[in-house]
Image (spheres, rainbow, N blue to C red):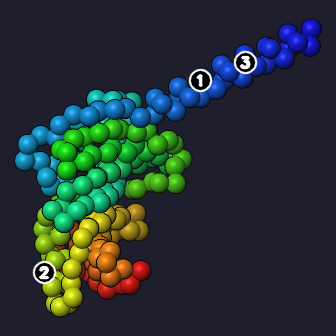
Amino acid sequence: MVFKIKNFFKVLLFIVCLFLLSSCTRTEIVINEDIPENTMTAKELVTVADSYIKKHYKKEKYYIGKIIMKLDQSFKGKIVLTYSTLTKSPHIIEVSLDTTIKKILTTRYVGKDSKIDPGFININKWKIDIDEAINLGLKFFEIYPDFKYDSVLVKTSNYFRGDMEVWDIEFHNIEKNMKYECSINPYDGNILYNKKIYF
């Protein structure tokens, strides 16, 4: 009798583990489709991602809240777009792209009550897109004679729940353990903050 009970609990535990594993795997959807030709700006990439969000997550209305780009010297690389439902306990979705291989890779449901709540950015109203923001940063830091970089980290930030939206850009120089960072107003292109930092 004891042996049967032990076996029963082993089977039950196995079923629960399978259920949890399948639940975890369902949170990520593999897309692996080409990014349309000549799609490079942040607004264009968000438009592409929006179509997959609407296709796979129909129950809720999702809004773009954050963009993170890890780029090389040619300004290509891995991008993560974070969406939320703008509710009290927001549902969070991340879309991963790679502009080096020109692919939209995956969508991933992060969860509800997540600490990664990105809020909301009005990117369609922004006058300064990613290419212009990077160029503004480059022009500003050219005042430093030692300015060189081998990678770029770009993030959108939504401070004070939408009262202040910015492009945060970091030019990294791995050889000198240095980064040049600036924050740019996406509505008028003004540089709000800049700093040269050793790390």
**CB under 8 Å between callouts 3 and 1?**
no
> Does 143 appear above or below 27?
below
Left or right of 153: which side holds 186?
A: left
Percent of width and height locating residue 162:
35, 63
Packing grade of label 2 (10 A; few <14, some 14-19, many >=20) is: few
Spatial separation of the CA atoms under disc 1 and disc 2? 54 Å
Helix, strand or loop status at disc 1? helix
Q: Amino acid at mark 3?
A: Leu
Residue tagged 2: 139
Q: Amino acid at mark 1?
A: Phe
Say if mark 3 contacts mark 2, CB within 8 Å.
no
Mark 3 highlights which residue? 12
What residue occupies the far left of the structure in this picture? Answer: 38
Q: Nearer the viewer, residue 139 or 184?
A: 139
Task: Give the residue type at disc 2.
Answer: Lys
Quarter of the image with the N terminus is: top right
Q: Disc 1 or 2, which lies upstream in sequence? A: 1
Is the residue 68 above or below the residue 105 in the image?
Answer: below
The answer to which of marks 3 and 2 sits earlier in the sequence is 3
Residue 19, numbered label: 1
Q: Residues within 10 Å of mark 3 (few under 14, many from 20)?
A: few
Q: Earlier in the sequence, mark 3 or mark 1?
A: 3
Please give the name of the residue rendered at 53% of the width and 25% of the height, measured from the top-left corner: 22
Q: Is residue 50 visible?
A: no
